[in-house]
Image: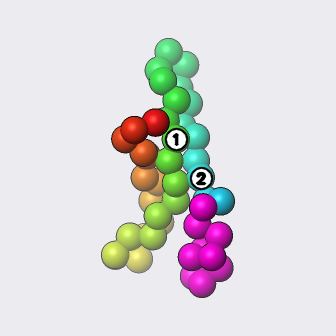
Amino acid sequence: MDEFHKQRAKCTVLNFDPGKDDEHGHLVHTRDIRWAFHYDLDS
């Protein structure tokens, strides 16, 4: 987990779907100890 915090900026995701705008986001660790993708609202 410490390594995730150090490298957080590198944990990105690109969601692409034909006919839709690309969504850029990043990996997050939730309070209930799960991993999820969070898509930036302003991209």
Q: Residues within 10 Å of mark 1 (few under 14, many from 20)?
A: some
Residue sticking out furthest to the top: 19
Q: CA distance from mark 1 to mark 2?
A: 7 Å
Q: Disc 1 designates what residue?
A: 24
Q: Amino acid at mark 2?
A: Thr
Could you tell me which residue is drawn at 52 percent across and 41 percent down?
A: 24
Characterize the magenta stretch by its predominant secondary structure. Answer: helix
At mark 1, the secondary structure is strand
Residue 37 in the image, given as x and y percentages of width and height: 47, 54
Residue sticking out furthest to the bottom: 2
Residue 6 magenta-highlighted: yes
Q: Are dots 1 and 2 in contact, CB under 8 Å?
A: yes
Q: Amino acid at mark 1?
A: His
Part of the protein shown in magenta: 1-9
Which quadrant does the N terminus fall into? bottom right
| Lower sequence index among marks 1 and 2 | 2
Q: Disc 2 designates what residue?
A: 12
Q: Residues within 10 Å of mark 2 (few under 14, many from 20)?
A: some
